[in-house]
Amino acid sequence: MDGFHRINDSNEKNVTHEVAAVCVLAGKILLENGAETFRIEDTMNRLAKSFSVDQAQSFVTPTGIIFAIEGCDVTQLVRITHRSTNLRKVTEVNSLSREVAEKMIELEAVHRRLTDIDRSAKVYPDWMQILAAAGASSCFLLMFLGRWEDALPAFIAGGTGQAGAIYFHRLTKVKFFSEFMSSILVGVIAVLSVKIGMGSELNKIIIGAVMPLVPGVPITNAVRDVMAGDLVSGLSKSAEAGLTAFAIGIGIALALSIN
């Protein structure tokens, strides 16, 4: 009889560890790809509850995740060193979480699906990102009441800025340096386009072309986190967004000073 209880206890312990691993992996994917803190903690707790683990606690910051289950010797800490914006992965994890809540999928299958999502390298190709940034730059220029003849300079400057951001990030792996250098490219192209007569309103061209570099998602998440009471995450993300804005501003100012 004692042996039977030991086997059951062992199996229950293994399942608990597996549930913790699934919750932490889901949180890691969400945090690395741009989800807000409230969503990450809520998803992790809901996943645990769906597998009958009611006493789960999670604490998420921009650089790490702590997950624990009360009454068990289960505590996991994950360090996050890379963050980007990939809303496709966020959507896939949210969809999977809803399937788990509706009891449509088993624990092992959830772990496999999350591993596939985490390893997935599906991103838009560079040329498409550059083309999208260029097109968005022209649209932003028109939205800010710029002239139609300035749409082409904004298109070129925005596309070049995005290409520079991709290249310098791969070269240095320093996010703020790549944003600084790409901003210089945007400023130089905008100034040159006005000097050679291809563009007319320098400020509108620059504003339109730098918009793809502006950290919109981090700013939105920072405000959302602060309003939800996640002050550590909110203030950290605010500082990150501020540094990005500072890098863009310094890059543009340097290009204009050269002019």
Image (spheres, rainbow, N blue to C red):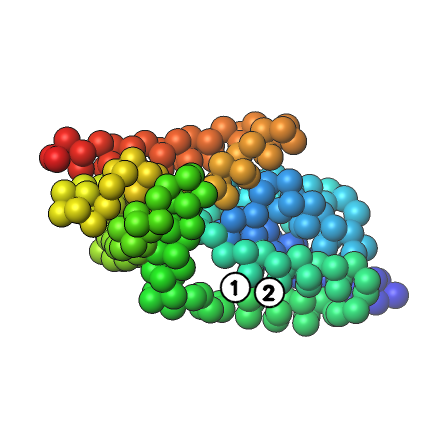
The residue located at (54%, 56%) in the rendering is 87
Percent from the top left, x then y, of residue 2? Answer: 84, 62
Q: Which mark is residue 240?
A: none
Secondary structure beneath label 1: helix
Secondary structure beneath label 2: helix
Give 137 or 145, whichever is nearer the viewer.
145
The residue located at (55%, 66%) in the rendering is 117
Question: Mark 2 to mark 1: distance in Å?
Answer: 6 Å
Task: Quickly name the residue at label 1.
Answer: 118
Percent from the top left, x then y, of residue 131? Answer: 36, 62
Query: Which residue is the extreme one toward the right?
Result: 1
Apparent side of residue 173 relative to residue 89 in the rendered image (left or right): left
- Quadrant position of residue 250: top left
Task: Examine the rendered structure and indicate whether residue 259 appears above or below residue 122.
Answer: above
Name the quadrant of the N terminus: bottom right
Apparent side of residue 201 relative to residue 49 in the rendered image (left or right): left
Task: Examine the rendered structure and indicate whether residue 48 appears above or below residue 121.
Answer: above
Q: Is residue 232 visible?
A: yes
Percent from the top left, x then y, of residue 82? Answer: 41, 50
Inspect the image, locate mark 2, and give the three-letter code of the amino acid beneath it. Answer: Leu
Q: Are marks 2 and 1 in contact (CB under 8 Å)?
A: yes
Apparent side of residue 3 relative to residue 254 in the rendered image (left or right): right
- Quadrant position of residue 227: top right
- Quadrant position of residue 229: top right
Task: Quickly name the residue at label 2.
Answer: 114
Percent from the top left, x then y, of residue 106? Answer: 75, 69
